[in-house]
Amino acid sequence: MQYLNTQQFSSYVSEKKKLGDAFLLFVTDDFKRLTEYQFIGARAMVFVLKGTMEIFINGKEYVLSENNYSDILDGMLFRFGEISADAEAYCVFTTKSFMLEALQGVIPG
């Protein structure tokens, strides 16, 4: 299984779905192309609106179903597994530096 970081897999996303190499949006069809890769060094926020989707975080399997969310921190190793035919899912990949810059000056509430 091949390992990819944010910059490497930014080539999998159309220009309309990214801001440089630091913020990438994946949609349901994109996940099917990513099951053979493992990711590390990226923050991933996964939203499943319907259907089911498997994700593996640090080797442990999780199944996300309708209206589930997972926030995967940049130090974790993860990969995507099976996704149901009726699934609608989204994932935002970003970097720690992008998040820190985006949140600069924001006071936690």
Image (spheres, rainbow, N blue to C red):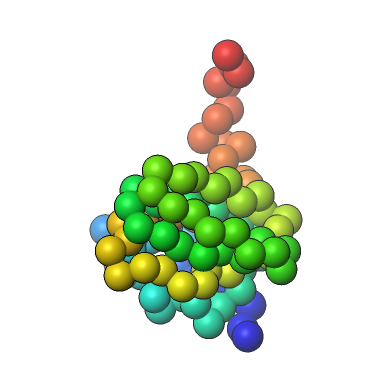
Q: Is residue 28 above or below residue 98?
A: below
Residue 71 visible? The answer is: yes
- Identified at 73% across, 56% down, the residue is 75
**Residue 77, image x and y in percent?**
69, 65
- Identified at 57% across, 21% down, the residue is 105
Left or right: 77, with 82 as reference point: right
**Residue 67, image x and y in percent?**
40, 43
Specify the quadrant that holds the N terminus: bottom right
Q: Quadrant of residue 17?
A: bottom left
| Residue that extends furthest to the bottom in the rendered view of this protein | 1
**Residue 42, image x and y in percent?**
60, 57
- Identified at 49% across, 54% down, the residue is 64
Left or right: 82, with 26 as reference point: right
Residue 5 visible? The answer is: no
Q: Quadrant of residue 5?
A: bottom right
Q: Is residue 105 above or below residue 82?
A: above
Specify the quadrant that holds the C terminus: top right
- Identified at 54% across, 48% down, the residue is 70
| In the foreground, 73 or 32 | 32
**Residue 88, image x and y in percent?**
31, 57
Q: Is residue 71 above or below residue 108?
A: below
